[in-house]
Image: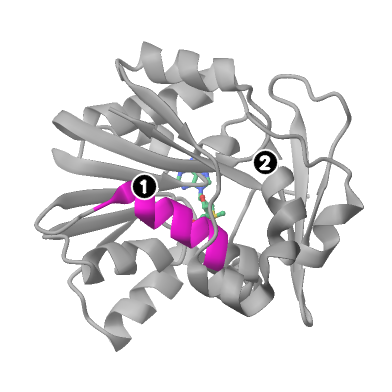
Amino acid sequence: MSTDYDDIAFEYKIINSQLAIKKYAEEFTFLNLLGDVKGRTVLDLACGEGKFTRKIKQRGARHVVGVDISQKMIEFAQSAEKENPLGVEYIVFDVMELGRIGSFDIVSASFLFNYASSKEALLAMCHTTYVNLKNGGKLVATVNATPLYLPINSNATQKYGYLIKSTSPLHEGESVEYLFFMDEYSFSIINYHWSKETYEWAFLKSKFRKITWQPPTISQKGIEEYGVEFWKDFLHQPNFVCVECR
Ligand SMILES: C[S@@+](CC[C@H](N)C(=O)[O-])C[C@H]1O[C@@H](n2cnc3c(N)ncnc32)[C@H](O)[C@@H]1O
């Protein structure tokens, strides 16, 4: 089991674009929190295959840069850019070592921080985020759900296409295995658990001031397609939570 996306890039790309929780909950909640990006400059950290990076540019952002540590994920992002040029710039780099590459209005980080395997790593990621923001800018992030919810070892998540396995109760920095599946595709990846207090410690230590947690919400389309009942267990124990820092 690893945290390396090079080996699972293809399966991730398929599931990330098609699984109901990703289309109707993750994407909906994250993009809503990101808000109006028209004319803004945006740095998308842990951009993966560029799903959000492209959407941000398509929503009118002036300049968008995507950064990811996985060569394979960036290759997918670049091939989408080649097919449909939007003017997004992609960089293969470890966020912890990126340093300041610009002064952005918004930094987005969908599922970055839960790859920090130590508090120092979490701090390094938060620091990179902060130094790339303009004064008054904002960070919008999604992290795995464990700071607020405990969807661990529950079979109720099976109908949404994922299982989360770890020891219970969770300890700080504990590894958590996420297994996603849809049709013939599946992948499994290791995340790390950090409590809400540890995340807030890292954000505040990186000089962010106002921290707002945002639980998942479901788009109207998701409710129409699957019905309210379907989403009940998910909303009770979701697989992610969003956070905004100013
Ligand atoms: C779950 S994917 C999220 C992709 C995209 N943000 C999304 O939500 O669709 C997590 C991504 O984080 C990247 N990643 C993990 N640790 C990283 C690091 N230290 N620096 C840059 N990228 C990292 C992985 O390579 C992977 O592409």
Residue segment shown in magenta: 24-35
Q: Of the residues shown, which amino acid type is indicated by label 1?
A: Leu
Q: Is residue 51 above or below residue 174?
A: below
User: Dot 1 corresponds to which residue?
Assistant: 33
Residue neighbourhood size for the residue with mark 1, other residues' Cα within 10 Å, grouped as few (<14), some (14–19), many (≥20): some
- 34 left or right of 190 in image: left
Q: Of the residues shown, which amino acid type is indicated by label 2?
A: Asn
Tell me which label, 2 or 1, sits earlier in the chain.
Answer: 1
* Of 139 and 221, the residue lying toward us: 221
**Which element is circle 1 on?**
helix
Specify whether residue 156 is in view.
yes
Is label 2 in contact with label 1 (beta carbons under 8 Å)? no
- Whether residue 29 appears in magenta in the rendering, the answer is yes
Residue 83, percent across and down?
31, 87
Specify whether residue 10 is in view.
no
User: Dot 2 corresponds to which residue?
Assistant: 191
Residue at image x 21%, y 54%?
A: 36
Q: Residue furthest bottom?
A: 83
